[in-house]
Image (spheres, coloured by chain):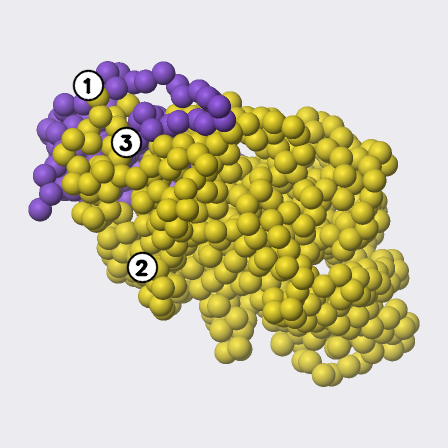
Chain colours: A yellow, B purple
């Protein structure tokens, strides 16, 4: 029996096709409130997703400027433009920013915006927690940069190895800010992982079985699972580090039974999967863009999914290859060499599936495809040097040289940033309603590709010639000057390329060609709705019967009727087969996630200065989170009007 | 002030309609329930996610313990092992607390408001008792965190688990108050059910930790 009898008003349910009144009411129901307070209270996944993407891109530019400063310094020998202390801060800030504030967050940010649209949902799973995770991330990143501008930027490398980062060799607060930045960003990333998994499992449109979800969504799902197992390790590492520094624990102090290598294990148990956390979403972009521009469904969907899962498992079995230069048993190293080489197999499976898709397709050479094609060239080069580094004798020779710097940039920029730029060009029309300029796009692409190779290819040679990483200058007699000058010229080219991208975005927002719902004739659900999408995403939730619903006859078999339009109601489906199970009312916008994030920030930063902040800092957090949870009577009435017990 | 819905009146299953099917391109879902328990609820998946993360953190902390132990000649390095009394007593109380917790969960699944009120209150009382005992446990560890690496890792694991005790006791208290004051809706019963699952996790994760802290220092 239903429990609507006591309700104060009867809800309005949507019909199929939705009436104009349905649509108008939906827009009102799902919109974030206006004004500054409304902006702070926003929970719509598209609003939060866009802020997330812009913020992560802002950190990418900041990290890039730090890189440019390093290249300026290294452009010629015996340069004293930047002193060693500032240089240490700059390379640490560059690595930390790119890894923790850009690479993983930007992928999660894209998924916050895109995944609900791709699976036919109206929201992410926990919209308030999503807003909270964004604010925590933003405040953590700002904290790091404010510390840097106050000459308290971390200076012990992006991994902050002990003993250098420990209390004896890094007095002051620099490393503490680094450790708490980890707490902020990993906390945010873990929350986002839970939100994503729950959403993908429960909020898919009816009929979108697990083996029909877009490969980008698969990629993000696998990434989210990896985050849940990898990030606790780095949080333990950074927490132990900060307690060693602040309250006198001895985790990494050999004089009192601690062990410095333990830190490396904890760090790389996270750090290696981290590479794949960045790389796998990139693969998801590839698998989305390639079929669209090859005008055919992806070749080998199941093989692709299995390869993603295999990569995720193997990624946890090779962290020790970052520690070949430490005193570990040789047999152990052989095992990690084997796994490091084995991970080439699932990567190759995917590459061959993409090649098969491209080979048998009719290619449309637009900017998104150019960026994805560059992936093959750049990533394969990075992969090959990876196989070289997996071998212990070679690794020992080039350890801590520019060869490794070259390798990691080929892998990370090739594997993630090229596809990411492709993804920006691909989904910009969906997010804004306007196309990015194709002409500037090509300039952006070619300058980026040329600049990238100019910057990083010479670093292979510099590394083989013995140039160590993290030196603030070098003598002219080393003979490294010309290749370094070339690399710096390349960095300038990349900077111009990124500037052109920003100009392109700026111009296109105003004058770009109007996109329409599906400018690329793509196959997935986000292209079935207007650009930019309305607040409610889908006027009527589609019922899906295919992997490429917009390309297949009957791919969208029908639509869902009977969901409330005057309340934030969504349909929830079963995990495997996406059979309809329940209708649930989602929470409305509220300021409390923002307030909670501010309280969390006070808590985390407070602990840098006093351990008692753990006690007094947690009280405002507890109050804010309770106020956030506490149901409001008006919202409660609306939910009761729709209530129907199982 | 709104009148709390008498959820007891909702008999399970009586409102269950056949799963909706597509008719002329229309999937009418108006008869679907507006909440569901266990794997049907978002809260179950959210809780499962948190348990996975925290379980990983516990497991890694235990790995740290044994890593440091294998590198030490003496373990504990220079202090006596923790006293067994409070830790063992607390373990027993935690195991007993699983029973009212289960009853709260069952009452929630029956949508039985007064049952939830009763058993959540018992759970809250258990939570506070366990926290007091945990306080006594911390006084009987026989080592400070800044004494040596053994002390550091013991305190790390204990505080990691204590954080879970504190947060879940707080969660349970808030839910308990809400069940007395309202406003209520069906989803709040799901919250109680999933909160109970989380408490089970807090208790179950303690058992290996208890073994490690108290007997890892004696083996």
What residue does disc 2 label?
A591
Residue appearing at x 71%, y 53% in the figure? A422
Q: Is residue A213 at least partly visible in the picture? A: yes
**Mark 2 falls on what kind of element?**
loop
The picture places residue A431, in percent across and down from the top left corner, at 57, 55
What residue does disc 3 label?
B190
Determine the CA span between mark 2 and mark 3. Answer: 24 Å
Between A5 and B73, the one nearer to me in the picture: A5
Quadrant where the C terminus of chain B is found in the figure: top left
Circles 1 and 3 on the same chain? yes
Determine the CA span between mark 1 and mark 2. Answer: 37 Å
Q: Chain of mark 2?
A: A
Q: Earlier in the sequence, mark 1 or mark 3?
A: 1
Determine the CA span between mark 1 and mark 3. Answer: 16 Å
**Mark 3 falls on what kind of element?**
helix
Q: Chain of mark 1?
A: B
Residue appearing at x 44%, y 51% in the figure? A535
What residue does disc 1 label?
B11
Q: Dots 1 and 3: beta carbons under 8 Å?
A: no
Between disc 1 and disc 2, the foreground one is 1
């Amino acid at each position: 029996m239903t429990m609507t009898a006591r309700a104060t008003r009867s809800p309005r349910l949507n019909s199929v096709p939705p009436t104009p009144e349905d649509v108008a009411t939906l827009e009102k129901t799902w919109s974030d409130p206006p004004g500054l307070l409304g902006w702070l209270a926003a929970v719509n996944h598209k609003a939060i997703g866009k802020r997330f993407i812009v913020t992560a891109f802002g950190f990418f530019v900041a990290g890039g400027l730090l890189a440019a400063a390093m290249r300026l310094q290294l452009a010629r020998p015996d340069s004293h433009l930047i002193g060693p202390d500032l240089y240490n801060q700059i390379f640490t800030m560059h690595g930390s920013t790119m890894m923790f504030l850009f690479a993983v967050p930007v992928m999660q940010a894209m998924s916050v915006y895109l995944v609900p649209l791709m699976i036919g949902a109206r929201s992410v799973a926990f919209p308030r927690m999503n807003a909270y995770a964004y604010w925590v991330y933003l405040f953590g990143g700002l904290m790091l940069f404010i510390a840097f501008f106050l000459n308290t930027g971390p200076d012990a490398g992006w991994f902050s190895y002990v003993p250098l980062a420990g209390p004896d060799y890094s007095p002051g607060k620099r490393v503490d800010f680094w450790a708490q930045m980890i707490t902020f960003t990993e906390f945010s990333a873990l929350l986002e992982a839970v939100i994503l998994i729950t959403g993908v499992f429960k909020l898919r449109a009816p009929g979108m079985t697990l083996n029909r979800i877009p490969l980008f969504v698969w990629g993000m799902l696998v990434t989210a699972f990896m985050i849940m197992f990898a990030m606790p390790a780095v949080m333990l590492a950074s927490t132990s580090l900060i307690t060693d520094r602040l309250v006198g624990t001895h985790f990494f102090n050999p004089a009192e039974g601690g062990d410095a290598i333990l830190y490396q294990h904890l760090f790389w148990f996270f750090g290696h999967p981290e590479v794949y956390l960045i790389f796998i979403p990139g693969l998801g972009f590839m698998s989305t863009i390639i079929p669209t521009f090859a005008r055919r469904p992806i070749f080998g969907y199941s093989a692709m999914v299995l390869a993603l899962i295999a990569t995720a498992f193997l990624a946890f079995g090779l962290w020790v290859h970052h520690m070949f230069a430490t005193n570990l048993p040789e047999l152990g190293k052989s095992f990690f060499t084997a796994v490091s080489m084995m991970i080439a197999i699932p990567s190759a499976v995917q590459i061959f599936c993409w090649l098969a898709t491209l080979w048998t397709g009719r290619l449309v050479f637009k900017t998104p495809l150019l960026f994805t094609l560059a992936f093959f060239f750049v990533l394969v080069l990075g992969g090959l040097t990876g196989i070289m580094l997996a071998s212990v004798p070679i690794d020992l020779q080039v350890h801590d040289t520019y060869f490794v710097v070259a390798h990691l940039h080929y892998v990370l920029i090739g594997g993630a940033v090229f596809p990411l730029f492709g993804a920006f060009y691909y989904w910009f029309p969906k997010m804004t309603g306007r196309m990015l300029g194709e002409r500037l796009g090509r300039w952006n692409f070619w300058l980026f590709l040329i600049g990238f190779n100019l910057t990083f290819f010479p670093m292979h040679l510099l590394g083989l010639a013995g140039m160590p990483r993290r030196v603030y200058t070098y003598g002219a007699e080393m003979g490294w000057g010309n290749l370094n000058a070339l690399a710096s010229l390349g960095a300038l080219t990349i900077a111009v390329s990124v500037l052109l991208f920003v100009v392109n975005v700026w111009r296109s927002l105003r004058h770009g060609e109007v996109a329409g719902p599906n400018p690329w004739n793509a196959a997935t659900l986000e292209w079935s709705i207007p650009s930019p999408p309305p607040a409610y995403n889908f006027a009527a939730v589609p019922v899906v019967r295919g992997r490429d619903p917009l390309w297949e006859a009957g791919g969208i078999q029908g639509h869902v009727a009977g969901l409330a339009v005057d309340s934030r109601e969504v349909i929830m489906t079963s995990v495997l087969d996406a059979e309809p199970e329940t209708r649930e009312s989602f929470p409305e916008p509220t300021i409390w996630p923002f307030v909670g994030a501010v309280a969390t920030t006070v808590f985390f930063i407070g602990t840098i200065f006093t351990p008692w902040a753990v006690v007094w800092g947690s009280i405002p957090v507890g109050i804010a989170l309770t106020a956030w949870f506490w149901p409001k009577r008006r919202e409660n009435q609306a939910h009761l009007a729709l209530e129907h017990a199982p | 002030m709104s009148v709390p819905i008498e959820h007891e009146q909702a008999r399970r299953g009586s409102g269950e309609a056949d799963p909706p099917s597509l008719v002329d391109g229309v999937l009418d879902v108006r008869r679907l329930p507006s909440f569901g328990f266990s794997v049907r609820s978002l809260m179950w998946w959210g809780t499962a996610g948190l348990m996975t993360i925290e379980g990983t953190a516990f497991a890694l902390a235990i790995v740290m313990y044994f890593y440091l132990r294998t590198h030490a000649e003496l373990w504990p390095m220079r202090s006596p092992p923790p006293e067994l009394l409070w830790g063992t007593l607390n373990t027993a109380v935690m195991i007993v607390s699983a029973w009212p917790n289960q009853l709260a969960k069952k009452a929630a699944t029956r949508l039985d408001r007064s049952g939830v009120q009763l058993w959540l209150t018992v759970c809250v009382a258990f939570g506070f008792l366990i926290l007091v005992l945990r306080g006594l446990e911390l006084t009987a560890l026989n080592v400070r965190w800044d004494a040596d690496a053994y002390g550091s890792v013991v305190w790390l694991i204990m505080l990691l688990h204590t954080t879970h005790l504190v947060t879940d006791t707080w969660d349970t208290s808030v839910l308990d108050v809400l069940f007395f004051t309202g406003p209520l809706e069906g989803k709040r019963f799901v919250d109680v059910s999933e909160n109970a699952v989380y408490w089970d996790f807090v208790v179950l994760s303690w058992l290996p930790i208890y073994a490690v802290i108290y007997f890892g220092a004696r083996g």
